[in-house]
């Protein structure tokens, strides 16, 4: 390793710590605390979700579940209801399970090491490192999307992160770039600082290099090509699916909903009965009701891996109708139930329009 590269890695952490003190973010609701419950909750919510969106959800969760014991004791339906609209619902289910494990297996106290934190459901290597470094000062590197961008640009790391071997190499480099002075005291500010750099300065497009504390020794800046990093060639293969959603509604606005299985898309959420075609939908209904169906224009809902084209079909029926004989197990929910019910975002959109 060249002397220049060694110096670059050694100085990086302390430079980020000094920058964060003056220029980093200090007003986020989950900052200025070393409570692992608060930090963990925010880290789970911030996965693939912007800060501006998370703020509102975080406030609601903390108001309803101020401690990990409160979250552990809640019913999954209530957790999913509060999470509804935030997306990636497996995060909420794993979060709930992790809270239950903290209470049942650890006496309500979060493990203090990143290694032990990773034994909890839904906590991966980077999230565990974030909690351990921010709350307990563990000298352990994080490597979320923002940090990958910062480090690959700074180092000129041009290998393809689509390879697990290459990502492992970047993890090893990240571990060598931690602060060198007063390490346990500096780690919370370093971890926050490198996240702040990625979120506010070293952005995916049009990075603000003039504001970056390490710009003078950043390889990507010197090359004039920061937006070429990080390199990741493997693209997610997208698919498309058509679904017909049956909205059976009573005269008072009550709607028949079914709870989805605990695996797959929208697992555990309440949904309108779905069908692969309009003909399949008609086939489950008594003939006398088929003429009462009204199909509306489809709406498109974008998931990570596929586009869903949802065709809403309404059917007015009395609440006394025995729908389980046609539509399987489900139940009626009044409009007053919907705000706290775990509903997929497009279903909530359909019900409220």
Image (cartoon, grey):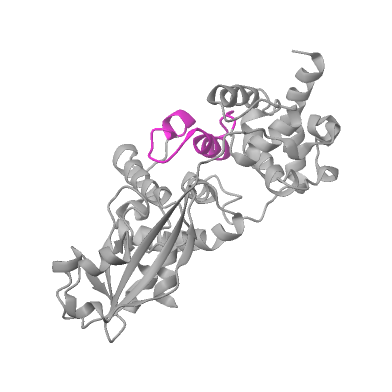
Q: Nearer the viewer, residue 3 or 267?
A: 267
- On whether residue 117 falls in the magenta region, the answer is yes
Q: Quadrant of the N terminus?
A: top right
- Asked if 121 appears above or below 241 in the picture, the reply is above
In the drawing, does residue 214 fall left or right of residue 110?
A: right
> Can residue 189 be seen by looking at this rendering?
no
- x then y, percent, for residue 225: 80, 36
Is the residue 336 above or below the residue 54 in the image?
below
Farthest-out residue, bottom? 251
Q: Quadrant of residue 71?
A: bottom left
Q: Write down the quadrant of residue 174 in the picture.
A: top right
Q: Quadrant of the C terminus?
A: bottom left
Residue 77 in view, yes or no: yes
> Seen in the image, is 31 located left or right of residue 212?
left
Image coordinates for residue 203, horizontal then vertical, percent: 72, 46
Work out whether residue 221 or residue 186 is closer to the camera in this orientation and state it. 221
In-image side of 82 versus 30 (left or right): left
Q: Residue at x 39, y 50 (%)?
A: 68
Q: Residue at x 77, y 41 (%)?
A: 19
Magenta span covers which residues? 112-141
* Front position in the image: 19 or 260: 260
Which residue occupies 41% across, 64% down?
310
The verdict on residue 286 being magenta is no
Residue 304 drawn at (x, y percent)? 49, 49
Q: How many marks?
A: 0
Q: Position of residue 321 (x, y in %)?
A: 16, 78
Task: Tell which of 19 and 338 is nearer to you.
Answer: 338
């Amino acid at each position: 390793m060249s002397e220049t590269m060694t110096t670059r890695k050694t100085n990086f952490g302390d430079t980020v710590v000094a920058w964060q003190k003056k220029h980093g973010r200090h007003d986020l609701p989950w900052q200025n605390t070393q409570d692992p419950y608060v930090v963990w909750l925010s880290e789970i919510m911030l996965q693939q979700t912007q800060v501006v969106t998370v703020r509102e959800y975080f406030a609601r969760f903390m108001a309803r579940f101020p401690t990990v014991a409160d979250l552990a004791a809640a019913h999954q339906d209530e957790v999913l209801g509060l999470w509804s609209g935030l997306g990636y619902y497996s995060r909420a289910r794993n979060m709930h399970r992790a809270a239950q494990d903290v209470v049942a297996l650890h006496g309500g106290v979060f493990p203090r090491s990143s290694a032990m934190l990773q034994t909890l459901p839904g906590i991966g290597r980077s999230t565990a490192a974030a909690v351990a470094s921010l709350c307990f000062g563990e000298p352990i590197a994080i490597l979320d999307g923002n940090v990958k961008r910062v480090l690959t640009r700074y180092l000129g790391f041009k290998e393809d992160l689509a390879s697990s071997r290459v990502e492992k190499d970047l993890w090893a480099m990240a571990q060598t770039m931690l602060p060198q002075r007063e390490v346990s005291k500096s780690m919370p500010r370093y971890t926050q600082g490198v996240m702040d750099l990625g979120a506010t300065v070293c952005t995916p497009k049009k990075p603000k290099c003039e504001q970056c504390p390490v710009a003078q020794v950043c390889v990507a800046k010197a090359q004039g090509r920061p937006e070429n990093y990080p390199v990741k060639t493997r693209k997610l293969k997208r698919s498309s699916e058509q679904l017909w959603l049956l909205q059976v509604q009573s005269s008072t606005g009550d709607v028949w909903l079914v709870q989805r299985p605990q695996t797959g898309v929208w697992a555990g959420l309440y949904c309108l009965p779905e069908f692969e075609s309009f003909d399949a939908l008609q086939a489950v209904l008594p003939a006398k009701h088929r003429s009462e169906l009204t199909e509306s224009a489809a709406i498109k809902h974008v998931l990570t891996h596929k586009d869903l084209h949802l065709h809403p079909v309404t059917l007015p029926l009395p609440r006394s109708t025995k729908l389980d004989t046609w539509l399987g197990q489900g139940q009626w929910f009044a409009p007053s139930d919907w705000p706290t019910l775990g509903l997929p975002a497009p279903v909530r959109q359909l019900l409220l329009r």
